Image (spheres, rainbow, N blue to C red):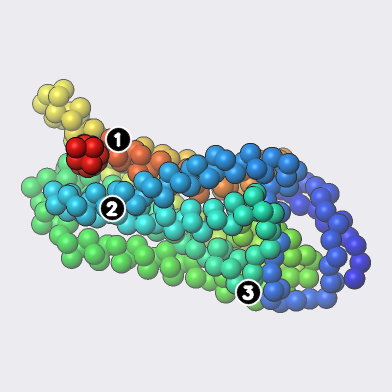
Amino acid sequence: MQKTVFCFGLGHLLPYIMLDINTTHFTNPSSFILLGIPGLEVAHVWFSIPFCTMYAIAILGNITIPLIIRLERSLHEPMYYFLCILAVTDLVLCTTILPKMLSIFWFNSREIDFSACLTQLYFIPSFQVIESGILVALAFDRYVAICDPLRHSTILTNPVVVKISLALLLRGALLVLPYPFLARRWPYCRTNVIAHTYCEHPAVLKLACADIRISSYYGLFVLFLVNVPDLCFIAFSYTQILRAIFSLPTKEARIKTFGTCSSHLCVIFAFYIPTVFSSLTHRFGHNVPLHFHIITANLYLVVPPMLNPIIYGVRTKQIRDRLIQLFCHKEI
């Protein structure tokens, strides 16, 4: 055993901690150590306040939306079924990272079991892929509803919605499945300390003392295979939708039709902009401070689950009216 100074950073060295490390290879370490936000440990408690608040809002909102859709029979339509899946996906995403992150901030509980780390490494990208697919499904639903409204009920039947949902779940589950299997087979002989608040896939790979190009290339493959086609399809759908909207005869009709799509557009921006920004920062922002990258990586997993139910609750009239009705009934 010897004491070694290990450096963590994105393209730069950050002397951080003196650790006792066994220099022999260990393919499956029993646990990893999550540092939280290196360099800002004194502010961990303060960081916990906004993250805990966002988590509470995300839980409340993503439970409320499916509950309202279940109670209101007029909302038993394809768009709202997809919103239910989106709500469950958001709950899983934020619950995968927030409890452990808050335990680090509040109790300095930094150790995470190796299997639990691999679970995070799998569930986070898997449900991100699923969420991206749900946004595509919502764009398709709006496209059919606005561009071909007479065939909407015959194209998006309940069996079709079920098949689309299963396809999205399988795509997310299977595409990311190699992540934990590849990560498990690498030897980790440098350190088991992760300079992050959760087991992010690239952060774990950096600890391996082996040729990890297979994992890196596969990660890029999944990123492009999912984001590029999904964004292209969404862009195509909304190009056609906007053309259909501007061809409507009256201004009132254009405003009303665009209003049905505005909430979905807000959710798309809330999901893709932070995701693309974080991915580009991680791969190309070599001069970006480590703590900034970690905070950004957490925000883009927490902010969309918090905003999605708020956006749909405020912008979707049927959900908003039903929510007001529920609260007014309770007050009476």
Residue under label 2, please give it. Answer: 66
Sooner in the amino-acid sequence: mark 2 or mark 1: 2
What residue sits 37% from the left and 57% below the top? Answer: 88
Mark 3 and mark 2: span between their CA atoms?
36 Å
Residue under label 3, please give it. Answer: 184
Residue 164 vs residue 17: left or right?
left
Mark closer to the observer (1, 3): 1
Mark 1 and mark 3: span between their CA atoms?
44 Å
Residue under label 1, please give it. Answer: 314
| Residue farthest front in this picture | 332
Sooner in the amino-acid sequence: mark 1 or mark 3: 3
| Residue farthest left in this picture | 150
Mark 2 and mark 1: span between their CA atoms?
15 Å
Query: Looking at numbered disc 1 in the image, what kind of residue is underneath it?
Result: Val
Residues packed near mark 2 inside 10 Å, few (<14), some (14 to 19) or many (20 plus): many
Is residue 230 visible in the rendered structure shown here? no
| Residue 225 point in image, percent of width and height | 45, 58
Query: Looking at numbered disc 3 in the image, what kind of residue is underneath it?
Result: Arg
Is residue 328 visible in the rendered structure shown here? yes
